[in-house]
Image: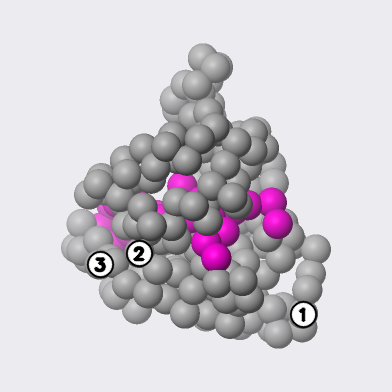
């Protein structure tokens, strides 16, 4: 790809702070979503039942060069409430993916997801990327709705893209945001955040 993968960095918003994910975040993260089947339903593996299991999952993403992971810190509580990542997109020039995102239920339908995406998309385009990709399971309608609310364009669906842990086939729905499309969508999203709480889902 023309643009390099982003370096670990701290991104600050009004509601959240994104900071490089470390194992020191595990106690907060386990409290936020450990063992919650609904939180982990679309993450490609079972919900971690112990802090040790969550540590192993976190270590795998921290050590994989294809990912740049962030802990999502609630500025109100000072605690980690989930994580999100940049992911390399082989075969595309100047493109990066935002994915492997989860949040504890306490922050669902709050400003957290919208602000995280604003911070990550702003940073990606500021680094020289010109396309941000997001994808999800075709059965994860909540995630698809949240991605569409960002203003992302549905690019298509890869049928039988990969197997789920239960052996069934996942079709993967792809979306993207282009650099020139972002300013108008960003202004709309920022206005929505400024207006206060909304029923938006994560």
Above or below, comparing residue 26 to residue 107 in the picture: above
29 vs 67, nearest the viewer: 29
94 vs 17, nearest the viewer: 17
> Disc 3, disc 1: CB below 8 Å?
no
Query: Label 1 to label 2, Cα distance in Å?
Result: 28 Å
Residue at 63% x, 48% y is 143
Residue 155: image location, x then y, percent? 51, 48
Residue 40: image location, x then y, percent? 58, 38
Main secondary structure type of the part rendered in magenta? strand
Q: Disc 1 designates what residue?
A: 196
Left or right of 95 in this view: 136 = right
Residue 3: image location, x then y, percent? 22, 65
Above or below, comparing residue 182 to residue 108 in the picture: below
Residue 7 bears which disc, if any?
3
- Bounds of the magenta span? 79-106
> Disc 3, disc 2: CB below 8 Å?
no
Q: Counting other residues with Cα less than 10 Å from the Cα at mark 3, is it few (<14), some (14-19), or many (20 or more)?
A: few
The mark nearer the N terminus, 1 or 2, is 2
* Element assignment for label 2: strand
């Amino acid at each position: 790809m023309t643009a390099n993968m982003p370096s670990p960095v701290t991104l600050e918003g009004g509601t959240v702070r994104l900071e490089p994910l470390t194992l020191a975040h595990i106690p907060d993260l386990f409290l936020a979503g450990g063992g919650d089947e609904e939180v982990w339903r679309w993450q490609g593996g079972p919900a971690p039942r112990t802090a040790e299991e969550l540590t192993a999952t976190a270590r795998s993403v921290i050590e994989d060069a294809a990912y740049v992971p962030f802990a999502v810190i609630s500025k109100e509580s000072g605690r980690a409430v989930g994580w999100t990542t940049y992911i390399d997109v082989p075969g595309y020039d100047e493109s990066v993916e935002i994915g492997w995102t989860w949040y504890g239920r306490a922050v669902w339908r709050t400003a957290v997801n919208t602000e995280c995406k604003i911070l990550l998309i702003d940073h990606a385009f500021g680094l020289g990327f010109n396309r941000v990709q997001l994808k999800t399971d075709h059965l994860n309608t909540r995630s698809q709705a949240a991605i569409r609310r960002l203003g992302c364009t549905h690019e298509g669906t890869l049928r039988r893209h990969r197997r789920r842990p239960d052996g069934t086939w996942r079709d993967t729905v792809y979306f993207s945001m282009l650099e020139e499309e972002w300013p108008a969508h960003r202004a709309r999203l920022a206005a929505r955040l400024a207006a206060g709480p909304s029923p938006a889902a994560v």
